[in-house]
Image: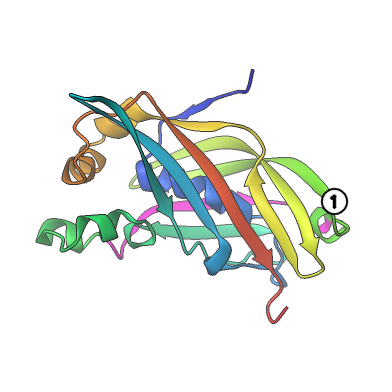
Amino acid sequence: MKRCHRLGMKWIGLTCALALLSVSPMLAAWELDPAQSRVSATIVQIGPDGPVPRHHEVRRLAGSANANGELQLPLRLNQSDVVERLGPLPPWLSGLTDRPMATLTTRFPPERLNALAVGESLVETLQLSVQTGQATRQEPLEVRFSRVSADQIRITNAERVALDGQALMADPTLRSVMLLLGYEQIGDEVPVSLDAMLVRPGG
């Protein structure tokens, strides 16, 4: 039976947080390719006609790690498809789209990535620090790194990951966004999947 992480972090921070993990294992010689790096989440809308699953994405994940493999990345609402679905935003929300909603920090031993041969994979449990406002949480996540070519390493989550839907709806800001999207009630779990690509600059 696969484990299900019920993380009580914020929607953007949570989803992106998983993606952020992917960025951790790179040196300055590696960077996340925004065109190929995203996190997908499925929200089950509970309505009068029953549950309806709806797909969302956080895209354009970007960043690079320092020489020690440490990564710090701010995550913004405008990286998600929420803004596209909402259309013109009310003044109270439009100012939030470009500001960091969460800051993610993690670290991976870069030498293990460099030692991967083409066609090989490895699974690592990364420690993710997620800061939202004044609160900081630590969460482990198993991530799979697969070497596609000399200049590309694909990153996916190595186990099933699900966010706590009720915890998401309990946050006042996130609940306001959910209501704008038409979500008055959602399922208990929000499954999340990561698909990102590390590349060598100019590779």
Q: Is residue 118 above or below residue 5?
A: below
Q: Is residue 100 above or below residue 143?
A: below
Residue beneath the point at 53% across and 67% down: 34
The residue positioned farthest toward the top in the image shown: 1
In percent of width and height, residue 52 lies at: 31, 32
Residue beneath the point at 23% across and 41% down: 178
- Decide if residue 25 is in sight here: no
Question: Could you tell whether 42 is left or right of 25 in the image?
Answer: left
Residue beneath the point at 75% across and 41% down: 123
Q: Secondary structure at mark 1?
A: loop
The residue positioned farthest toward the front in the image shown: 49
The residue positioned farthest toward the left in the image shown: 91
For the C terminus, the image quarter is bottom right
In percent of width and height, residue 149 lies at: 80, 65
Q: Is residue 99 magenta?
A: yes
Q: Looking at the image, how many numbered discs can be counted on the residues?
A: 1
In percent of width and height, residue 44 lies at: 34, 31
- The magenta stretch is 97-111
Q: Is residue 110 above or below residue 52?
A: below
Question: Could you tell whether 201 is left or right of 93 in the image?
Answer: right
User: The residue under label 1 is which amino acid type?
Assistant: Glu
Q: Is residue 33 above or below residue 25?
A: below
Residue tagged 1: 120
Rate crowding at label 1 as few (under 14), some (14 to 19) or many (20 or more) other CA atoms within 10 Å.
few
For the N terminus, the image quarter is top right
Residue beneath the point at 61% across and 37% down: 141
Residue placed most toward the observer, 34 or 42: 42
- Decide if residue 124 is in sight here: yes
**Which of the 4 quarters of the picture holds residue 75?**
bottom left
